Image: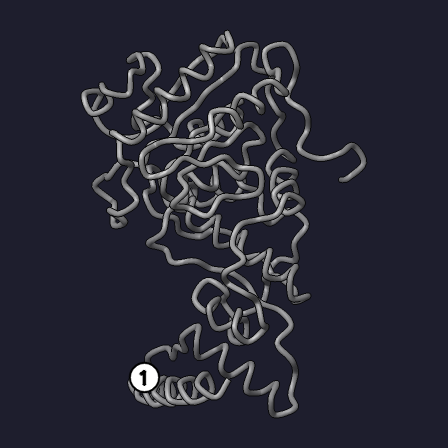
Amino acid sequence: MQRFLVAGALGYTRSWAKNVVKTVLGRKSHFTANDVLFRVYFRQLCGGSKLQRFTCVASTREGAGSQALMVMEAIRFASTTGLTYLHTPFAEVHHADRPMQAWAAAWEAHFNLGAGEIPNDRDGTDVVNYAFTFPTLHALFGVDESESGFDEPTIREFRRRYYLNKSPRKNETLSVCVHARRRNHNDFHSEDSTDLSRLAHVLARLRSVLDAHGVVYTLRLFSQGQIEEFRDLGIAESGLFLDADPFWSMREMIEADVLVTTRGTFSYVTGLYCDGIILGDAHVPPASGWLTYDVNGDFEAEALASRLSHRSARTQTRSLPWEPGDQ
């Protein structure tokens, strides 16, 4: 607390001094997200109004997966602390392939995270932004950051919102989808690029389990790049969907019966929405119920076989991710 107050006071004083100069020059003043949090919390300590509401506006340099995950974390934080989350729709999302307004609106409708939330219609002056202050907020409200991952009720709620404007699909043949994150010309998180040699081992082991149990399946990979880069994965060219529409790609993976995710927030968020069997990279904290593969691409084949034995997507429509009457 003392460290936060000292650092916050110094930062706020610097911003205040800069704003004095900006005012003289006729320019618009600006306080950082940390400045706003300090002002609101300090006012609370002095007996003023309490910090009760916050919003989440992620960096505009982040893509759809990263921004969606940050909003999900904000909603979970509100649930944990009893604070009120004010939803701010996406305004600018990285990797746009169309005019920004249409691109951001499309992702807003795709995730539907604001469904049922209070809109953020305030001017922003005293609205704390979770995206740039969450480490401090967690510390101030005693939230243990080591408790990572979403629990099943939270995941089910996100899925419910997602399907409010969509319908779950029937897979006549078991659908296996794979997401591989590759570097592209807009990229700046090189460490999240998929290790294709490890992924090849994962898929070989996955095939052996499916074949051993006589499972008929389709196998598709969604990524970016050239066909030659994925030769060693053993996937037919017809099953490689490279640089395809991201909305269609994510939905295809969400509807999978078995989904192999890799590093990166696009992959992780897709896994959260998918109610199939998730096989994820153990480097990323798994969500509730996920199976994981290690640095060598190995995973518990018996656990996967057990999951497969309880899942029949070839003749049954996928169940809704919520119970009738929950809406």
Task: Give the farthest residue toward the right.
Answer: 325
What residue would you read off at disc 1? 22
Tell me the quarter of the picture where residue 182 sits: top left
- Colour mode? one colour
Amino acid under label 1? Lys
Q: Residue at left 38%, top 79%?
A: 29
Q: Residue at x 44, y 51 (%)?
A: 67
The front one of 116 and 203 is: 203
Count of marks overlaid on the render? 1
In this view, the residue farthest toward the bottom is 46
Left or right of 261 on screen, residue 214: right
Specify the quadrant that holds the C terminus. top right
User: Residue at the spot x=56%, y=20% of the render?
Assistant: 308
Q: Nearer the viewer, residue 293 or 17?
A: 293
Give x and y (percent) for residue 125. Answer: 51, 75
Image side of residue 149 versus residue 318, left or right? left
Q: Is residue 223 above or below residue 189?
A: above
Viewer-closest of 101 and 32: 32
Residue name at image x 48 percent, y 66 percent: 134
- The location of residue 267, given as percent across then percent down, is 41, 38
Answer above or below: position of 124 versus 312: below
196 is higher (above) or lower (below) than 151: above
Judged left or right of residue 63, residue 112 is right
| Side (left or right) of 259 relative to 119 | left
- Image coordinates for residue 49, horizontal then vertical, percent: 65, 83
x, y percent for residue 103: 41, 41
Q: Secondary structure at mark 1?
A: helix
**Front residue (pair 212, 190):** 212
